[in-house]
Amino acid sequence: MSGNNSNDLAQGLKSRHVTMLSIAGVIGAGLFVGSGHAIAAAGPAVLLAYAAAGTLVVLVMRMLGEMAIASPDTGSFSTYADRAIGRWAGFTIGWLYWWFWVLVIPLEANAAAAILHAWFPAVDLWAFSLIITLVLTLTNLCSVKNYGEFEFWFALLKVLAIIGFIVVGCVAMFGLAPGSQVSGVSHLFDTQGFMPNGLGAVLAAMLTTMFSFMGTEIVTIAAAESKDPGKQISRATNSVIWRICLFYLVSIFLVVALVPWNDPALAELGSYQTVLSRIGVPNAKLIVDIVVLVAVTSCLNSALYTSSRMLFSLGKRGDAPAMSQRTTKAGTPHVAVLMSTAAAFLCVFANYVAPAQVFEFLLASSGAIALLVYLVIAVSQLRMRSQREACGEKIDFKMWLFPGLTWATIAFIVAVLVVMGLREDHRAEIIATALLSIGVVAAGLLVHRKREAAGRVALDN
């Protein structure tokens, strides 16, 4: 499909791009570093938190896969919400999702800049942050193939790093690593038991780990720019179970088996670095820093891509400025890329200029968006499946145990949102996200009324 100056995206992503994106595109610093905080809070029972959050993602991806295979679309779940629930739902979740990824851009740029600044202290933190964001913006502006190529190599390095960690961890667990301070799996139970801080701590850890899976749905957005989207989405959706088991559950199992959960290094240094140091791997900090740098750069790259595609889709549906659907001759939505980057820079500016509370509110406002996205996907699938069955349509790729499992997923997500609202450490996120959602819905209604009024004036004339 050739791009022009209006609204055509190029189908420039190759099969290997989409495959690698689906395998490791969502693995960020949360797994390598952030998991240490979850382990320190819940102990070895953090495995239950990861298993619960992972199960939710598998079910949601199955539902999304059912809709995306039938109708591949760059707007993904936002477009399906538009059709199944109503235009207000597609508008709201589309803009909230765009906002989520726009906020990720400065956060990941800052994380990457912090690592580079530690290596080259003569260069200011903000300079590294600016350079990284500009370089990745330029690659996203050139063509979708560039994004795919960057993401292919980023994801491949992350996969190799995790597999390497699992191999080294298994060698140490069986007592075969020379000079290692750790072996066996005794730490799963020998430090105040498997669930030292009770079920409440596991629930809190689940709320934290749930957001480390956000981004699994990107493959349904990216697949729309590949030559055989249905096949790519089907393959990615079917592989989500082993990906979560291997990358998250196996690697976290090795961490809690080899290191006591109350080791202060877990929260300070991160889970991977702590384990590698205890095993006696030389230059453990440098290795993990390089892997984290690749991971956060990859997430920044994906954030730029995803936010621009969602904005492009909103533009095509008339829910964003018309200019956002313009594409270059290479089929790249350049205006949407630039608008998303500009919004990210405004967030950075707010961080430096405005009081700390302003940026804290911005961050908190994205806290429950992942759960809202999952909820919208589940409700959309429930309605679209019923509509398709009523029309006698043949459904090749189905959600399991429909409608019971879909209803159970909806009930679980609502329960988690209620728990977040009741817990003091997550209440601010619920309030901020609710205020943002109300603001987006109000803006949508205002735009809709203005359009209707303009339409009536045009008819009268």
Image (spheres, rainbow, N blue to C red):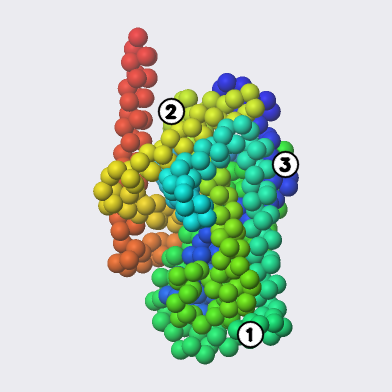
Relative horizontal placement of residue 317, taking residue 163 as reference (left or right):
left
- Residue 412 visible in image: no
Q: Mark 2 Cα within 10 Å, few/some/many (few <14, many 20+)?
A: some
Residue 383 or residue 458, whichever sits in front = 458
Instruction: Name the element at disc 1.
Output: loop
> In the structure shown, which secondary structural element does the residue marked by tag 3 occupy?
loop
Amino acid at pointer 1:
Ser
* Residue 111 pos. (x, y %): 47, 54
Distance from disc 1 to disc 2, alpha carbons, whole Å, reads: 58 Å
Is disc 1 in contact with disc 2, using a CB cutoff of under 8 Å?
A: no
Residue type at tag 2: Pro
Disc 1: CA contacts within 10 A as few (<14), some (14-19) or many (>=20): many
Q: Is 11 placed left or right of 253 in the picture?
A: right
Q: CA distance from mark 3 to mark 2?
A: 30 Å
Mark 1 lies on residue: 183
Q: Which class describes the residues within 10 Å of circle 3: few (<14), some (14-19), or many (20+)? A: some
Look at the image and tell me in which quarter the N terminus lies: top right
Q: Which residue is mark 2?
A: 321
Q: Circle 3 sits on which residue?
A: 14
The answer to whether the residue labelled 3 contacts the one labelled 2, judged by CB atoms less than 8 Å apart, is no
